[in-house]
Image (spheres, rainbow, N blue to C red):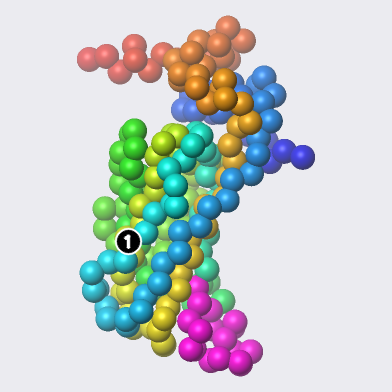
Amino acid sequence: MQPKTYDVRSLALWAPKIAYGMVVGVPRVPFVEEIPIQFSSSTINAPPVVQNLQNNLTQDTCIERVSFHLFQQNSFPGSPFQSLYFNMLKQSGATGVGVQMQIYGAPKYEISSQFVDAGMLADVFAVTWPEGWWIAKQSNVKVSAILTQTPVSVPFNVVLTFLGYQFLSKELDDMAEDEARSRLRKLGIESPDINILLKP
């Protein structure tokens, strides 16, 4: 079983290696990683808690979904209201947790230069990146988080989950994007040479 299908001709414009891998039938395998964050103090706008993926990515990776889980063990312990509270907090889009996200590697860039609510960040990925977020191998995801609202209790645990896939082929993983574009053009799929188009 493979993940959902994509518009290969669209992918060929911005992610030629993904497009080529799909055209030639390279198998894909699931990728799931988590970044756990714990607030031990309820102080708002304190110095951020900083975490990242446990290891750098060993392969090019396409992230299809970013989700999050909230938990405060001392809020409504043993009560059915505990799960209800966290579900309502999550669905409100105002979790009280501000997140900054950066990618370290080549290229290095920021996802958010300011602290954005964790719920809003997850929604942005779901809405604006429906065909996936491509992260190059040897990169890492760094997350800085602060409290923007006083939580009911601490510790306050937040877990960001990154779900996607990797191609099961070292040859494709090592292939340069220019080579992937060239091979797609030979197959009749438009994939312009970015180096030529971006020349001043």
Magenta residues span: 70-86
Dot 1 alpha-carbon crowd within 10 angstroms: few under 14, some 14 to 19, many 20 or more = some
Quadrant the N terminus occupies: top right
Mark 1 highlights which residue?
50
What residue is drawn where x is 52% and y is 44%? Answer: 63
Number of marks in the rendered image: 1
What residue is drawn where x is 39% and y is 45%? Answer: 140
Is residue 18 within the magenta segment? Answer: no
What residue is drawn where x is 34% and y is 15%? Answer: 195
- In-front residue for pair 65/139: 139
* Above/below status of 192 relative to 6: above
Camera sees residue 149: yes
Residue 64 drawn at (x, y percent): 56, 46
Residue 16 drawn at (x, y percent): 51, 23
Type of amino acid under label 1: Val
What residue is drawn where x is 24% and y is 73%? Answer: 45
Residue 23 drawn at (x, y percent): 65, 21
Within the image, what quadrant is residue 192 found in? top left
Quadrant the C terminus occupies: top left
Residue 139 drawn at (x, y percent): 40, 39
Most extreme residue toward the right, as rendered?
1
Q: Secondary structure at mark 1?
A: strand
Residue 89 lies left or right of residue 101; in this view the side is right
Residue 11 lies left or right of residue 94; in this view the side is right
Residue 167 lies left or right of residue 124; in this view the side is right
* Above/below status of 42 relative to 126: below
Camera sees residue 94: no
Most extreme residue toward the front, as rendered?
55
